[in-house]
Amino acid sequence: MSSILIVKNLTKEFLIRKGFKMFTLKALRGIDLELYENEIVSVVGESGCGKTTFLRVLARIYEPTSGSIELFGKQVPSKMNRREELEFRRQVQMVFQDPFASLNPTKRLSHILERPLKIHKIPDKSQTLENVLTEVELTPVDNYLEKFPHELSGGQRQRVVFARAIITKPRIILADEPTSMLDVSIKSGILNLMIKLKEEFHISFIHVTHDLAAAKYVSDRIAVMYAGLVVEEGNAKDIVNKPMHPYTMLLKEAAPDPEKANTTKMVDIGEPPSLITPPPGCPFEPRCKFSKLECKNPVELRQVNGRKIRCVLY
């Protein structure tokens, strides 16, 4: 498989004010990740780990502080002209977490879906609208085109968001926790839709989630992020079934397991570190039960048993 997106040593810092002082928050501290054709990579981690910031940098909502992003073999420039920006937006689409805030409540679905067609000058609007709504399983199409977003359920709204994302025929979709605000009963439908879009349209996904079970179900690979760094990356089933990094182990142990409903115990995994003054060594060292002296020194991501891991235990 060939890489369509290569991220190298990506960092993002924010200046924040506390009282009368300014501080630097290090949201991303050197992310390396590749995305291949026709695959889904899930970025997993608890709130505040930097996973949504990572997607927003990839989507050019935020400018990176340093590092490089290579798309389809070409470096993504820090400043893009209008033509470059349109081409980038056509090839890389984003699905946001909240389907209720993602759609203009004053516009009908026909207007919402036609907007990217007008921006990118894509002809044959009526047939295109029919095709994308059919692909996201909102049929009969005529029952939906003149509806307003408030007339739809949460799951239907998220399907409209996916329809809008695929209407430009992108090669990459960045999905920011697309099921986190949906009922459990309809989450699987959205995950199955992602798999369908990958298989039928050869769209690659970077999927951000805090849900290990969802990541295992939908993904080819998983990257576990903690305190602005990737601490483990590999095959999705291997990562979930046999985690190697202590943080991944604790994520798995803390997650509810329907098959072990009577034996699941609550796990106190403490609090993540400050991203203003992160630990000098392994970011997980203050919370790790396997911590040793060398963990206080910087730890690089290394190849171990077919996966990448940032831990001195291996």
Image: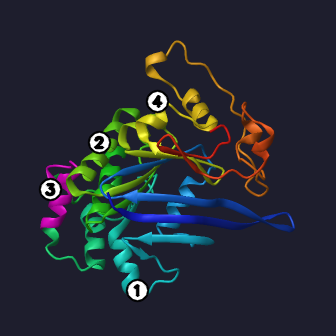
x then y, percent, for residue 249: 58, 32
- The question of residue 223 being in magenta is answered with no
- Which of discs 1 and 4 lies nearer the camera? The answer is 4
- Which of discs 2 and 3 lies nearer the camera? The answer is 2
x then y, percent, for residue 238: 44, 35
**Quarter placement of the N terminus:** bottom left
- Which of discs 3 and 1 lies nearer the camera? The answer is 1
Circle 1 SS class: helix
The residues colored magenta run 127-141
Q: Residue 136's mark?
A: none
Query: Is 112 or 57 nearer to us in this picture?
Result: 57
Q: What residue do we see at 62% from left, 61% from top? A: 30
Q: What residue do we see at 65% from left, 59% from top? A: 27
The amino acid pointed to by label 2 is Asn
Mark with earlier residue (3, 1): 1
The residue carrying mark 1 is 82
Task: State the residue lying farthest toward the right.
Answer: 20
Circle 4 SS class: helix
The residue carrying mark 3 is 142
Left or right relative to 44: residue 112 = left
- Give the main secondary structure of the magenta stretch: helix
Circle 3 SS class: helix
x then y, percent, for residue 296: 79, 46
Mark with earlier residue (2, 1): 1
The residue carrying mark 4 is 241
Q: Distance between the residues labelled 2 and 1?
A: 35 Å
Mark with earlier residue (1, 4): 1
Mark with earlier residue (2, 3): 3
Left or right relative to 20: residue 243 = left
Query: Is 66 or 116 nearer to us in this picture?
Result: 66
x then y, percent, for residue 306: 46, 43
